[in-house]
Amino acid sequence: METKKTIRVLIAKIGLDGHDVGAKVLIFWLRDQGMEVIYTGLRQSVEQVVEVALQEAVDVIGVSILSGSHVSISRKLMKRIRERELGDVLVLFGGTIPKDDIAVLKGIGVQGVFPSHAKLEEISAFIQQNVKHGE
């Protein structure tokens, strides 16, 4: 009988964005879906988030962002992820993200982009379908 590994998700708030209600709603939803969720808290740096991801051996890094700095932060984050050899980690961005920026984020390497109107079910299904378990 094969046991399924619990998906470990890191939810991060990078930069000066101080609004985290949406992130907290997502955290509770993902926990209800059987995932283990670690929350960095507000005002983290890219370096702090990547170090927590390494220490906690997460499968997913989800960045909640409402400040409009998603493109510059995603560039820094993906660069740091490559430097620290975390290539198997699924990276998601959610929040206030204009439709035109979705392709930009995906071009930078973000695998999933979920604007504010995304459904919680859509996010958890994407994670379950795309997370890599060291395969």
Image (cartoon, rainbow, N blue to C red):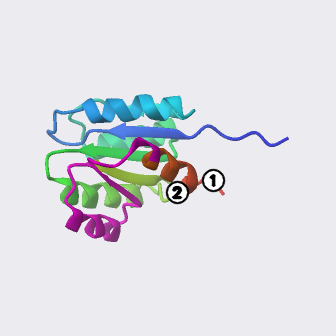
Query: Label 1: few (<14), some or many (≥20) within 10 Å?
Result: few
Q: Amino acid at mark 2?
A: Asp
Query: Residue at coordinates 62% horizontally, 50% vertically from top-left?
Result: 133
Q: Which residue is mark 2?
A: 88
Note whether 40 is above or below 81 in the view shown. Answer: above
The percent position of residue 41, horizontal first and vertical second, equals: 29, 29
Left or right placement of residue 76 versus residue 133 in this view: left
**Residue 120: where, in percent of width, then height?**
41, 42
Instruction: Count all numbered tags in the image, as a single digit.
Output: 2
Quadrant location of the C terminus in the rendered image: bottom right
Kindly check if marks 1 and 2 are in contact, taking CB atoms under 8 A apart as contact.
yes
Q: Residues within 10 Å of mark 2 (few under 14, many from 20)?
A: some
Residue drawn 70% across and 41% down? 4
> In the picture provided, is 112 more to the left or to the right than 76?
right
Residue at x-position 29% and y-position 70%: 103
Q: Is residue 40 visible?
A: no
Q: What is the span of residues highlighted in magenta in the rendered image?
A: 95-121
